[in-house]
Each structure stands twice: as C-alpha cells, then as structure tokens.
Image (cartoon, grey):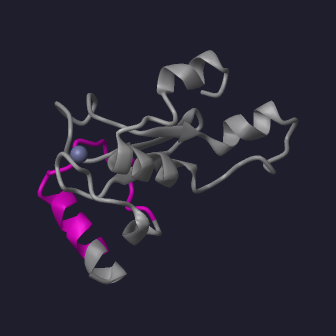
Amino acid sequence: MNRESIIRKVKLNMSLGKYKAISSYKVPDDVEEWDVCNTCGLRPIVWEFNNGRSTACGCGKNEYNHFSIYAESIMSVVKRNNGSAMEYNSNDLKTNWNVYQRTGITICDRNRLIEDGKW
Ligand SMILES: [Zn+2]
C-alpha cells in the first residue's frame, strides 16, 4: 500500500471513531514507516506536546484512557541541554513504537521519563 492510501485509511478510521484519542492526535508524516498495532491492527496516530510525545491506536477504554508509547519532547530535551536541541531525535517515538510491536519491549516508560526529569 502506498503512503497516500495508508493516510486515507487512517483518516477514515479516525472519522469512524476507531481510535481512542483526543483530537490533538495527528497522522504522522512518515505514517508508512510505523508498524500496525499487534493488538488492534491500526497504525498509530501521534501527539507532540510540551511534556512529551505519545501514540494512540484503537487500544484502550476511551480517548482519555488509552494505550500509548512515549518519547521525550523537544521542549524537554532543549530545557535539559541549556537551549540546545542537538540531542533531540525526532524518530524516537517511531522507534519506540516499532520496537514494542516487534518485540514487546518498552524502551521508554512514561514513569521513568518523569523520574528522570524528562517529562
Ligand atoms: Zn492498538
């Protein structure tokens, strides 16, 4: 499936209410590089905000209580590094998501981010 048809399918599923996510979640630009969820079969949509980055798919109870994979936000990286974004990797969330889907390993736990002052 090409990128355009993947985006169309994700947007259709969003409009059908299959995603457990608030409206701030968007289709990632490189959506074709994100694995489908092993549990619900949907490709994830993502939210990047001041505190962090997170995914949403069809897994979970509702838009406020759902399964997510996490990564540190660019704001947090910049704050920890005296204004420098050198250490920021925009692919971290995708990597964390794909590793989880392929191995079940959670690279980046949200509680760990909070403990480490990265949230
Ligand atoms: Zn899922």
- Which residue of the protein is positioned furthest toward the top in this rendering? 115
Q: Considering only vertical position in the picture, is 73 above or below 3?
A: above
Q: Give how far across and how far down residue 63 sits, in percent.
A: 24, 36
> Relative to residue 94, is residue 65 drawn left or right?
left
Q: Considering only vertical position in the picture, is 116 above or below 61?
A: above
Q: Considering only vertical position in the picture, is 45 above or below 29?
A: above
Q: Give how far across and how far down residue 102 sits, in percent.
A: 35, 51
Q: Dividing the image into 4 quarters, which one contains the C terminus?
A: top right
Q: Nearer the viewer, residue 9 or 101?
A: 101
Q: Considering only vertical position in the picture, is 76 above or below 36?
A: above
**Residue for point 20% across, 40% down:** 59
**Residue for point 66% across, 52% down:** 89
Q: Give how far across and how far down residue 57 sits, in percent.
A: 26, 47
Q: Is residue 52 magenta?
A: no
> Relative to residue 73, is residue 60 drawn left or right?
left
Location of residue 77 (image quadrant): top right
- Which residue of the protein is positioned furthest toward the right in this rendering? 82
**Residue for point 23% across, 50% down:** 38
Q: Give how far across and how far down residue 33 sits, in percent.
A: 42, 67
The number of numbered discs placed on residues in the rendered structure image is: 0
Q: Is residue 10 magenta?
A: yes
Q: In which of the image's four quarters is ligand 1 placed?
A: top left
- Which residue of the protein is positioned furthest toward the left in this rendering? 16
Q: Dividing the image into 4 quarters, which one contains the N terminus?
A: bottom left
> Relative to residue 119, is residue 61 drawn left or right?
left
The magenta segment is 7-28
